[in-house]
Image (tube, rainbow, N blue to C red):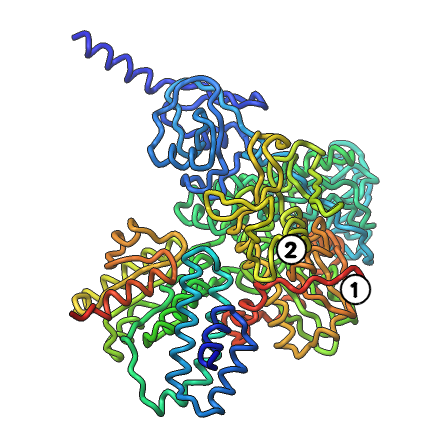
Amino acid sequence: MQSRNVAAINHESGNSDCLVTFQPTGRRVEVETGTTLLEAGRRAGLLLSAACGGVGVCGKCCVEILSGDLFPTEHEEREFLSSKGYPPRARLACEARVASSVVVSIPVGSFIVGQRLQVDAQDLSIECDPLVESHVMKLAAHSLGDCRSSYARVSDALASCTGEIDWTMRLGVSRQLAPIIQDDCTVSVYTRGTEIIGFASPGRTPVGLAVDVGCTKIAAYLLKLDTGNQLAAAAVPNPQIPYGEDLITRLVYADRSRSHAKTLASVVGQTIESLAKNLCQDAKVELTEIADVCVVGNTAMMHLLLQLPVTQLLRAPFVAALDCGIDVSAGELDWPFAPGANVHVLPSIGGFVGADHVAMILARIDGTNKTTIGIDIGTNTEIVLRNPKRQRFLTTSVPSGPVFEGGHISDGMRAASGAIDRVFIADAELCYATIDAADPVGICGSGVLDVVAALLRLDVIDLRGHMQRRHPRVRSGKCGLEYLVVPAAETGHGRDIVLTQQDITQIQLAKAAICAGIETLMDSEGIKPLDVEQVIVAGAFGSYLDLKSAIDIGMLPRFPNAQYLQVGNAAGAGAKMCLVSRSARERARIIAKAATRIELKKCAGFDGAMARATRFPKFQHSNS
Amino acid sequence: MSTLDEIKNALAELNEDEALKLVSSALAAKLAAFEILKACQEGMAEVGRRFECQDYFVSDLMMSGEIFKQISAVLEPELKAGGTQSAGKIVLGTVKGDIHDIGKDIVVNMLKSANFEVIDLGVDVPPEKFIVALRETGATVLGMSGLLTLAFDSMKTTVQALQTAGLREKVKIMVGGGPVDGNVCRFVGADDWGADAQHAVRLAKGWLQPIHP
């Protein structure tokens, strides 16, 4: 009888809520017994890193339990953690399930927030020709002598100032009619074509929002539509990261059920909305004054945002559901902007070569009369070759992997506080710098490139990428040879930071894919190294990497006649151009049509070029 | 050192230009194509050994595969004329829905260098295509590769299709690719799995070259 009681009590407590407190932020959330810490973190709005999508294999979500009980560790999890040298209180957030209220500490490396996010999308030099116009007009109040509907008052007034008599509006816009015409009043009416899309106080000019949805971060820009002036800009981490670090994991997640797909769409939608709110606050404009929106992103991000079918994107030959540009009503995406505002999503080229690549070409490649190679490095690296003698743009996408975002590297991390982001040689010694000058906790992409370039120069690795056993800082680690980058005594987490032979292999494969992709495009177009006049490196990683390191390790070929430019977020710049200019949108459509996508797998020379490009180029002395 | 030893060394050292030059001068000197091929195979075997000792890495396997592919292309006409015997036939490909081929290509080249005749069906290969190839060539070993998790379903479907086609008993099946392990092997119903190209060669040898008493 007594034992029954105990069981009953336990059962009851099993249903009750457990309070999970996350340190160092102090964020709290109540969850049911048995919930994983990763899920609890998501519900608390914390961005915990889970590169593998929460299946217990990447170890990126490791947290420390400060107090409270969890269900016992799976044997495999324990083995995994001890093999990585984590302390006994460490658990994988994706595997650990709460059994009581707990306090959890999230180490720096497992936290996604606070990473360096690039927003700059440099100057716009474009003539504004926005789709949305603003008309200031005086509207007479209702009276016995004038019982025209509110709509008729507005449309008549518009007719008298534009000559156009047939005006349409959506339901959301109609609902704003009554409040604005209570007294004799003057208003600004926003129109797009022959549609009335919103109202504002007199003298207000419409603003627009340009958004670049990246796999890692979302950048948004608020612009005045009539002048193109940028009022505010900001970027935040992509809130889908907790659902999978790379886009394939996220697509698989979305493919599992409609509710998953909805979740991934709504977290991004809400993030864009709150970005817009903050930008409007900074710029002192109302959210409802946002009269136009232009969105770019890679194919996967656009499919997830618009909740397009993704099953076919996950299987060869990786077909997009939609590749033309599309206009969606802002209301359909639950964005509380001007009630008739549209969201324009740029066209894409095909496969994973998406709208962001079209935007980059539009912003940085389209106008040039030089033989240009444009490259946006990420998990998928998009490359474009522009031969000014031809109409077409030759593009391709190479799966370069997450190495340059710190993935697949034993001590790799994102560009967040404490990441080694610069490495250089002084007095034949390796020196490093970290983000925020914090104690180092890992190496981010630009640091990875620099370390390899430095190790090549110091002959710690040879041209085949083999580590030299005899070097004093090379030692035997758990997975073969490794180079000690920073000893435990100097690090922020008390463990050595190393670069292993396996890491070097990963870097070789990634940089070889990029280099071979460039060479294969050049072969297809008959362009020789001496012909290349310009190399444009775009994107967040592309802006922070050291060009010399990138060339030294052979990720970018050394073109004697080329100027290399790091242009920042070119996709964002393209989105801004399309926001304020009708003709830029038309140009984007033409670019998407004129772009020829090369399938590298089908190019006879690619495999050989890639095998050869895994080698490092001979070190060029400082005359370069 | 004989030319053949030099060829073997050039391959083992992954010296592309040197190896190709030596092969063409060996052909010009009327050395038998199958002897040259044998030297190359020995060089590739040495590459495999070094890989197992962690002196060589995946990038080196890719490079050796590329050199071997070029030499094979040069030797092929001569070898056809000579009618050399292969160690057995293997049908191989990346399964439907997946297009990863770096690992698969390394396995193909390693198997070829171990004197197997490999029918490489490429990537995104549907079950029917595997079955047609097995029937047409009479191969008794099937290798399936895949890196994406959804490739496991394709592997399973292919094994079931072999069953339906009445081929399962006659064909040994190996699977491989990044996340493939014993669990995946059991799930898809394959006979064995390989963690790397050397492993695949050992499996093929075990199945196709029973040790003679």
From the viewer's perspective, is residue A523 above or below residue B149? Answer: below
The local secondary structure at tag 1 comes to: strand
* Residue drawn where x is 62% and y is 62% of the image: A616
Tell me residue A621's x, y (percent).
76, 61
Tell me residue A246's x, y (percent).
52, 48
Q: Is residue A89 visible?
A: yes
Q: Which of the two residues, A161 or A387, is positioned nearer the viewer here?
A: A387
Contact between labelled residues 2 and 1, with CB atoms less than 8 Å apart: no
N-terminal-most mark, 1 or 2: 2
* Residue drawn where x is 81% and y is 58% of the image: A126
From the viewer's perspective, is residue B156 above or below residue A21? Answer: below
Q: Amino acid at mark 2?
A: Asp
Q: Which of the two residues, B203 or A238, is positioned nearer the viewer here?
A: B203
Q: Is residue A407 visible?
A: no
Q: Nearer the viewer, mark 1 or mark 2?
A: 2
Q: Which mark is residue B13?
A: none
Residue for badge 2: A459
Instruction: Give the position of the N terminus of chain A as an image quadrant.
Output: top left
* Residue drawn where x is 55% and y is 77% of the image: B18
Label 1 chain ID: A
**Left or right placement of residue A313 versus residue A137 in this view:** left
Label 2 chain ID: A
Residue for badge 1: A563
In which quadrant of the rendered view does residue B189 lie? Answer: bottom left
The local secondary structure at tag 2 comes to: loop
Count neighbours of disc 1 (C-alpha within 10 A) and say few if under 14, some if 14 to 19, many if 20 or more: few
Tell me residue B172's x, y (percent).
23, 65
**Left or right placement of residue A324 versus residue A94 in this view:** right
Q: Which of the two residues, A258 or A453, is positioned nearer the viewer here?
A: A453
Instruction: Give the position of the C terminus of chain A as an image quadrant.
Output: bottom right
